[in-house]
Amino acid sequence: MSASRLKILSGNSNRPLAEEICQAIGVPLGEATVTSFPDGESFVKINENIRGQDVFIIQSTCPPTNHHLMELLIMIDAARRASAQRITAVLPFYGYARQDRKDQPRVPITAKLVANLLVAAGATRILTMDLHSQQIQGFFDIPVDHLYASPVFFEHLAHRKSANPLVVCSPDVGGMKMASAYADTMGAGLCFVAKKRKNATTVEAMNVVGDVAGCDVLLVDDITETAGTLTAAAKILRAQGAVSVSAAVSHCILNDVAVERLKSGVIDELITTNSTPITPNGLPITVLSIAKLLGQAIVRITNNESVTGLFKIKGF
């Protein structure tokens, strides 16, 4: 498929990222009106011809989550009715991903519901990054291209030097696979924190499995909202003798509780991406751009090329 048939549209969730992606690959951002009526209903109008084109709609389902999800569904429907040849929903951050199983009686599997809605609206392909659990790819009966933010983090971390040994730590048992991949690539030690969650915003760190005394520790996780898991882990790691504690988190959706926790200084630096809009506002936050990574994936998908090469890591 010719790159001239490529069309990129954006909702309102993260327009700066969409503009940066377009700049990275030299493609203009498509013209579309995405607004709301006074009663809150979303309205979409695509202001140019997309008949027979390869359309990519960029929209993170970050807060306000439901509003941005509806915008995405309506944009997909508008593109389908405008006779787009292929419609790829680009979700740098896939909301509802933590509701991926029935872990209690009479609860939904909302991650699967969102997958059904995207397909029903007319999406023919999904491009996303660092899903909360890999199994969500199987919720779709259409192709899913799943990227990782790790190459972006590795490129940033490759320039760092320290006299202390480095240990990569998972703040819970579920993240051990990701932490192990980081540790192998960086030639670092590995540990994890056993935790107990009291409620949606409070976590009690129980114990550290591994040696961190005299080491710089890098916590790795896919998402943080209240920073409860990260700060609880950081406190017990420092108590076990860690010299410094940083965190690399793919998606940050920080609320007021998280801001106060980060102000405490228990985490020296939080490294994240612009998959969702985030402003450091004086907090120890470093925001890395995934625009080039997503842009390369979009070009490769348009040209029917493999995206596997994007997983290759330079500098390690």
Image (tube, grey):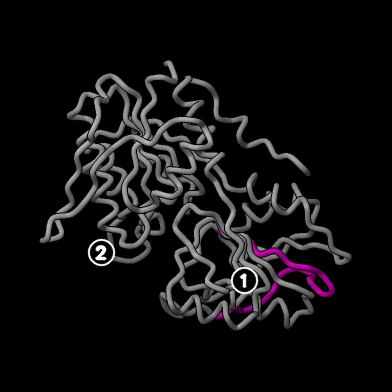
Residue 222 higher or lower than 231, as above or below: above
Q: How crowded is mark 1: few (under 14 residues within 10 Å), some or many (20 or more)?
A: some
Q: Mark 2 points at which residue?
A: 106
Local SS, label 1: loop
Residue displayed at 86% across by 66% down: 164
Which residue has dot 1 on it?
284
Which residue sits at x=49%, y=45%? 129
Coordinates of residue 114 in the picture (x, y in percent): 29, 48
Residue 179: percent from left, percent from top = 66, 56
The three-letter amino acid code for the residue at tag 1 is Pro
Answer with left or right where residue 313 lies relative to residue 221: right
Three-letter residue code for mark 2: Arg
Residue lying at 62% horizontally and 60% vertically, measured from the top left: 248
Q: Where does the magenta region start and end? A: 204-221
Name the residue nearer the viewer: 76 or 103: 76
Residue 13: x %, y % from top left: 35, 53
Q: In the image, is residue 55 part of the stretch drawn in magenta?
A: no
- Pick out the residue farthest to the right: 163
Q: Is residue 284 above or below residue 303?
A: below
Report which quarter residue 48 is drawn in: top left
Q: Main secondary structure of the magenta part?
A: strand
In screen coordinates, is 73 left or right of 295? left
Q: Which of 146 and 209 is in front in this view?
A: 146
Neighbor class of circle 2 (other Cα within 10 Å; few <14, some 14-19, many 20+) is: few
Q: Earlier in the sequence, mark 2 or mark 1?
A: 2
- At a point 26% along the width and 39% down the height, the residue shown is 32
Q: In which quarter of the image is the N terminus?
A: top left
Q: Where is residue 205 in the image (x, y as percent from the top left)?
A: 59, 78
Determine the secondary structure under disc 2: loop
